[in-house]
Image (cartoon, coloured by chain):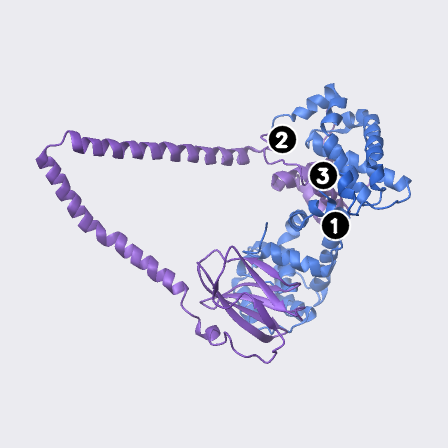
């Protein structure tokens, strides 16, 4: 049943084998293993891209992620990654057990076999350690707290515009309410929205634009930013600022 | 690179393979019927017709399958071809795209199956097929849809790009008014594009190239997803979603 591994038909487009091979590569995320000749052709050929996309769509529900092997592609890298993940998990479990055991053994040993003098000395050392160490985590915690607090510092340029009156008063924002703490997602909604063409921009408290998009419809959902802090959002239309609001991510 | 176990079944007992793939065949048929192969009352008979035709093609499948894809993927391509030839030989009947359709098909409805998440997945698959042109396409899509561009976007396109020219362009881009038209945006980008491509293109060349790629992407989506009507605006949304660091993805 072995035939020549030809991927093109007589019309110089991909044949069924070529399309199937490319779809497997897409589904397995191994496009780099597709022969360069095929990749170059597909990147330039709309007809073949449509064939590939059509078959890919049909097979979208077929789960190939559990495949350990493939007749043509090497899945070694993926398998290796899977193996390392498993090894890390096992190592973490073994490590956890070992640490727990060591602590239990140490505590049991303290109570059972050490003399009062030794125990006193250990207590003394522990006390010194606790004094010596108390500074480091404390300082680190203080630094962390300062860094975190800085994330909630208002950005004056935009803070002054929050709740400000803008020339286009026809945009009434229903959500998000100013100053709310965002849940997993943040909903943007306007009343009687003449929303078409509006642009929403999320700005960090350092003035950095972290996201910008045209509103195609409202309500409009965004997953909250990953980093905690104070964020502002601007609503604009053709260069005109319509609204500035703010929200918190904790 | 072990053998796909289905290869042995294809060799020894192809009927068992077709039985094994029966759900997949049904999905492809339902998909084809939504594209105009008849009403829901005909699903069972069309599945039978396709399965019979597939049985007839077994010798050809055994001869032409060249071991570069999973058998499942290759057979899917063949089933799709059979559905196509049936569609061409029969007049279009009532579409399955009606609520009652769900009762007849024990799978999720077409609308549920082709959710926004799946559109995202197909969109990603289409972009990947542009292969070496992808870095250029990403830059152009971001320019066209006013999505923030970074130095890394250009360096992915042309790693050897002159850093001073790039820095000047990025700095200049910060001063662009939001009211710029597509024509103006691409006109201002042309000198950098010419540098990146080491050729002299006219001001409107890249804009037209971008528009044609957007049309191709929309076409590939519309051909793959039954009932879909993707256009430049929906491609804009998919693009914004694709590059958003925290848009809802589930």
Chain shaded purple: A
- Which mark lies nearer to you, 1 or 2? 1
| Horizontal relation, residue A50 to residue A99: left or right | right
Q: Residues within 10 Å of mark 2 (few under 14, many from 20)?
A: many
Q: Is residue B153 above or below residue A79?
A: below
| Label 3: how many Cα within 10 Å (few below 14, some 14–19, many 20+) | some
In this rendering, the label closer to the viewer, 3 or 2: 3
Residue B17 in percent (x, y) is at 73, 25
The structure residue drawn at horizontal position 41% and vertical position 63%, both measured from the top left corner, is: A151
Give the number of the mark in front: 3 or 1.
Answer: 3
Q: Residues within 10 Å of mark 1 (few under 14, many from 20)?
A: many
Identify the image quadrant of the N terminus of chain B: top right
Residue that carries the numbered disc 3 in the rendered image: B107
Q: At x 65% / y 72%, what residue is drawn?
A: B180
Q: Is the C-beta separation of discs 1 and 2 under 8 Å?
A: no
Q: Earlier in the sequence, mark 3 or mark 1?
A: 3
């Amino acid at each position: 049943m072995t035939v020549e591994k030809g991927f093109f038909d007589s019309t110089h487009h991909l044949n069924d084998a070529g399309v199937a091979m490319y779809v497997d590569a897409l589904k397995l995320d191994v496009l780099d293993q597709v022969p360069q000749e095929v990749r170059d052709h597909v990147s330039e050929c709309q007809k073949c891209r449509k064939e590939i996309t059509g078959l890919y769509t049909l097979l979208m529900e077929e789960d190939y992620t559990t495949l350990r092997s493939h007749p043509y592609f090497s899945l070694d890298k993926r398998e290796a990654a899977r193996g390392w993940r498993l090894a890390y998990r096992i190592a973490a479990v073994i490590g956890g057990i070992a640490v727990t055991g060591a602590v239990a053994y140490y505590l049991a040993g303290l109570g059972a076999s050490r003399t009062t003098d030794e125990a006193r000395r250990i207590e003394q050392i522990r006390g010194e350690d606790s004094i010596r160490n108390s500074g480091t985590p404390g300082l680190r915690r203080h630094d962390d707290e300062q860094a975190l607090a800085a994330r909630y510092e208002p950005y004056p340029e935009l803070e002054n515009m929050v709740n400000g009156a803008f020339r286009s008063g026809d945009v009434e924002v229903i959500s998000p309410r100013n100053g709310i703490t965002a849940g997993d997602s943040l909903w943007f909604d306007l009343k009687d929205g003449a929303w078409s063409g509006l642009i929403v921009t999320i700005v960090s408290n350092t003035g950095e634009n972290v996201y910008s998009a045209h509103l195609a419809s409202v309500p409009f959902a965004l997953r909250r930013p990953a980093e905690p802090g104070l964020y502002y959002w601007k609503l604009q239309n053709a260069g005109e600022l319509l609204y500035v609001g703010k929200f918190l991510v904790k | 690179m072990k053998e796909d176990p289905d290869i042995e079944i294809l060799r020894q007992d192809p009927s068992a393979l077709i039985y094994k793939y029966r759900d997949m065949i049904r999905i492809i048929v339902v998909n084809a019927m939504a594209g105009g192969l008849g009403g829901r009352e005909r699903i069972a008979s069309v599945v039978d017709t396709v399965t019979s035709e597939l049985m007839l093609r077994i010798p050809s499948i055994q001869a032409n399958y060249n071991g570069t894809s999973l058998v499942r993927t290759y057979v899917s391509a063949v089933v799709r071809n059979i559905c196509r030839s049936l569609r061409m030989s029969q007049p279009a009947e009532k579409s399955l795209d009606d609520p009652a359709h769900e009762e007849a098909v024990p799978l999720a409805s077409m609308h549920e199956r082709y959710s926004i998440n799946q559109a995202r997945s197909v969109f990603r698959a289409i972009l990947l097929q542009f292969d070496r042109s992808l870095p250029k396409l990403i830059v152009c899509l971001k320019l066209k849809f006013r999505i923030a561009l970074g130095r890394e976007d250009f360096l992915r396109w042309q790693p050897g790009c002159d850093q001073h020219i790039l820095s000047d362009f990025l700095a200049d881009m910060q001063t662009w008014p939001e009211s710029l038209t597509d024509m103006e945006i691409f006109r201002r980008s042309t000198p950098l594009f010419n540098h990146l491509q080491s050729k002299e293109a006219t001001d409107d060349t890249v804009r037209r190239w971008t528009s044609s790629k957007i049309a191709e992407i929309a076409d590939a989506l519309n051909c793959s997803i039954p009932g879909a009507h993707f256009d430049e605006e929906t491609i804009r949304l998919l693009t914004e979603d694709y590059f958003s660091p925290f848009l809802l993805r589930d």
